[in-house]
Amino acid sequence: MAKIIAGVAMSHSPMIMTNEASGGEKGQRFLHTAAEMRKYLEKSGADVIVLISDDHFNSYFYDHMPAFTIGTGECEGWGDWQLPKYNIPVHQELAKHILHTSLENNIDFAFTLKMKVDHGHTQGIYFLNPDLQIPVVPIAVNTSAPPLPSMDRCFQIGEVIRTAVESWDQDLKVAIVASGGLSHWVPIPKIESEKPEDQFLINVLKNGRQEIDQLDEYLKLRETNVTRIKSGPVNEQIDREFLRLITEKDYPTLRNWSAAYIEEHLGNGGQEIRNWLVLLGVLKNFDASVACYEPIPEWVTGMAIVQFSQPVGPENRKASSEQEVSI
């Protein structure tokens, strides 16, 4: 049977790609830790990565906005924010098994045989699996277009993913990666805005890419709107509280955080912590350690990385010690 062996949750920010230097020493510490997480996943011997992130109005719009989507066929990166247009290898057998197991457990994923993902997923690829040596099961969570799935529902999604992986009839090792958050405020209008300057973008958000006559110009406008921000608010206090709740496994508290609470304290971009809740549902019995936290206003985001490891109990403490010596 398949076995879940490791996990990593990490923030993403387009600014890393467009202005890495602005992060200074804090940014370099984050990037160094990301490199260490790549080594961690390599040493874990993971055969598959279940990669959980979100879309930023590149693939999904209000004309069709699924709460949870799983890619079961081809997967390609949009190449936004100067990231490669990855042709991501999908482990289709596991993806289909998760889909079918979820349906049997009353979880209705949307699914696609031709998935396109943006920097939410591809920045995780860029840092943790850049050579595409490990096939991926891509899962997208709606964190951008209210109404959003509850934090509790995201945790439940993770629980059924764990059930699916552990019931999979393959002797393979599976790692779980979530990408998104922490606190940040994104310059995108609310869908109900009546401001004249917001109407072009709102029309696109409502009706999708077919409303864009000049796609390159539209994408450049979006990039300009973000990169012109030289510093953005970061709520270090709530970021650290979120990380504390994770390391102390106070999942009931996190499952009860509302969308309104998150928006107030972590910003509209902070809604991406839903990706972490899916991961926590999978790895709720794993031990979590904060590998890195850096509040980086220059990247407009509270940047965190958390490493998840199998708990070491009396029955396997000796085996773990022997493994540490060998490493």
Image (cartoon, helix red, strand yellow):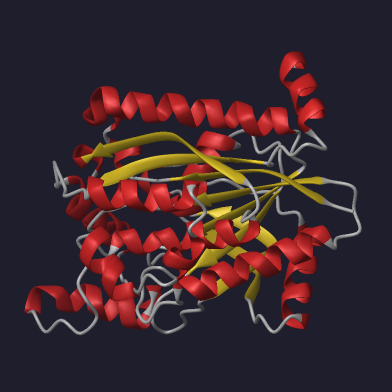
Position of the C terminus by quadrant: top right
Residue 46, horizontal then vertical, whole percent: 74, 39
Position of the N terminus by quadrant: bottom right
Image quarter of residue 225: bottom left
Residue ID at (31%, 71%): 213
Residue ID at (42%, 84%): 63
In-front residue for pair 35/241: 241
Residue pushed farthest left? 196
In-front residue for pair 20/326: 326
With 58 as the anchor, is 25 left or right in this view?
A: left
Residue 209, horizontal then vertical, whole percent: 39, 73
Image height check: is 233 above or below 291?
A: below
With 188 as the anchor, is 104 left or right in this view?
A: right
In-front residue for pair 98/70: 98
Residue ID at (13%, 41%): 230
Please tell me how many numbered marks the rendered image carries: 0
Image height check: is 295 above or below 56?
A: above
Residue 2, horizontal then vertical, whole percent: 84, 52
Residue ID at (8%, 79%): 195
In-front residue for pair 313/181: 313
Residue 94, horizontal then vertical, whole percent: 78, 59
